[in-house]
Amino acid sequence: MRVVAKGAEALLYLEDWLGLTVLVKERMPKGYRDPVFDRMIRVRRTINEARLIMDAAELGVKTPVIYDVDVVRARIRMQYIEAPTLNSIIRANGYSGPVKTLMRRMGELIGTLHAGGVLHGDPTPANVLVSNGDEYLVDFGLGERARPTWDDRYLKRVAVDLNVLLRSLESNYGEVGNALFSDFMDGYGSVVDKSELVMRWVRRIRSLARYYTGRLT
């Protein structure tokens, strides 16, 4: 076993499984939670993430192939994709032509998810792997399924997804973040015909956030 990453919720490690090198995402027990409640949460989130990954794949979005879901250990065995993240590519190349293309492609992928009723939960360049020109979306741990009704309720949920991305871009890339988001929206809008309505909700969410921040300080 070789640990790849350790997050607040799960441990990622490589494992030899049936002759394959696979990536394992295992949700670790939390000692501060009641054991029964803790197990219920870990199992539910594991099953939910596995379903979302498979749902995304059915929509035509590239994701790691799932080999096994172990509900007893709350872990998912999946394809190990040894590739850089879009985040690392942006940092290495700056705001370049290839980066613009990759951001537009990411927008198409997230747009495809939203059109199909899948909310990623954490759609940032750190959760996009780029392998041989293809982009793979990973880490659906915060995601959820919803009916893509495109009413105000769904638009708001979709906008929250995009606001997570925009905040990440602004935080990590400063002024370039807005240009990256614009490229993303070019791709997103080619898939989602209600992208302007989504952006209205993004602006509304950000306006409310600024208002409440001002009130608290």
Image (tube, grey):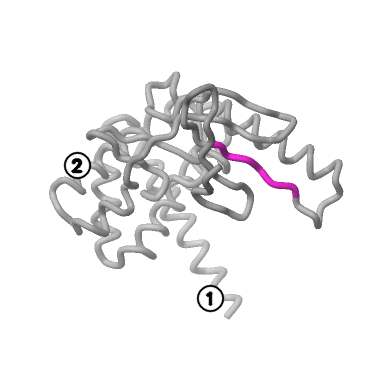
Residue 101: x and y in percent read: 19, 42
Q: Residue furthest left?
A: 97
Which residue is found at the position 59% from the left and 32% from the top?
76
**Amino acid type assigned to the residue bearing label 2 in the image:** Thr
Callout count: 2
Dot 2 falls on a residue whose secondary structure is helix
Residue 23: x and y in percent read: 50, 36
**Neighbourhood count class around disc 1 (C-alpha, 10 Å): few under 14, some 14–19, many 20 upward:** few
In the picture, measured across the screen, residue 78 lies left or right of residue 185, that is: right
**Amino acid type assigned to the residue bearing label 1 in the image:** Gly
Which residue is found at the position 39% from the left and 35% from the top?
81
* Residue 15 sits above or below residue 170 on the image: above
Which image quadrant is residue 123 in?
Answer: top left
Quarter of the rendering occupied by the C terminus: bottom right
Q: Could you tell which of marks 2 and 1 lies nearer the N-terminus?
A: 2
Dot 1 falls on a residue whose secondary structure is helix
- What's drawn in magenta, residue-wise? 24-29
Which image quadrant is residue 8 in?
Answer: bottom right
Q: Which residue is mark 2?
A: 101
Which residue is found at the position 69% from the left and 35% from the top?
74
Residue 136: x and y in percent read: 37, 34
In the picture, measured across the screen, residue 88 lies left or right of residue 1, that is: left
Q: Which residue is mark 1?
A: 214
